Image (cartoon, rainbow, N blue to C red):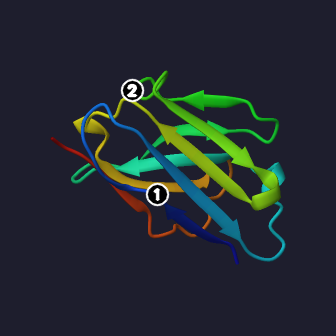
Amino acid sequence: QVQLVESGGGLVQPGESLRLSCVASGSAFIFSVVTMGWYRQAPGKQRELIAHIFSDGTTNYRDSVKDRFTISRDNAKNTVYLQMNSLKPEDSAVYYCNRARGPALDWGQGTQVTVSS
């Protein structure tokens, strides 16, 4: 069974930055070959995929975060990151990581990001 643990969220002002981390652990899980993604869910809205990274490092972003967010991975640490710059109030949500292709893993608890002045 794979565990996903997200961290790095917090309360920031508009225009500030945060870096989220997600560590994946579990037996028989080859992190390096899995396409990983960051998702977010705002109150009253569906969870949405905002960025994902393939095993070869290729990345894709939802238009709403393109040019502000950067996804990266460290396969040696089974960790995926999300650098978030120029944060806006509409970025406020609970952020999760999970597979972006194939069956989802068990969801972690997520990390809350709140952008407010």
Residue 35: percent from left, percent from top: 71, 46
Mark 1: secondary structure: loop
Evaluate whether residue 51 shows in this view: yes
- The residue lying at 74 percent from left, 60 percent from top is 78
Identify the disc placed on residue 52: none
- The residue lying at 36 percent from left, 29 percent from top is 86
Gap in angstroms between the C-alphas marked 1 and 2? 21 Å
Q: Quadrant of the N terminus?
A: bottom right
Q: Residues within 10 Å of mark 1 (few under 14, many from 20)?
A: some
Q: Hey, what amino acid is under mark 2?
A: Ser
Above or below, 68 against 76 in this view is above
The residue at which mark 1 appears reads as: 8
Q: Quadrant of the C terminus?
A: top left
Total labels drawn: 2
- The residue lying at 83 percent from left, 61 percent from top is 30
Between label 1 and label 2, give the one nearer the viewer.
1
Identify the disc placed on residue 64: 2
Q: Residues within 10 Å of mark 2 (few under 14, many from 20)?
A: few
In the image as oriented, which residue stretches furthest toward the left? 117
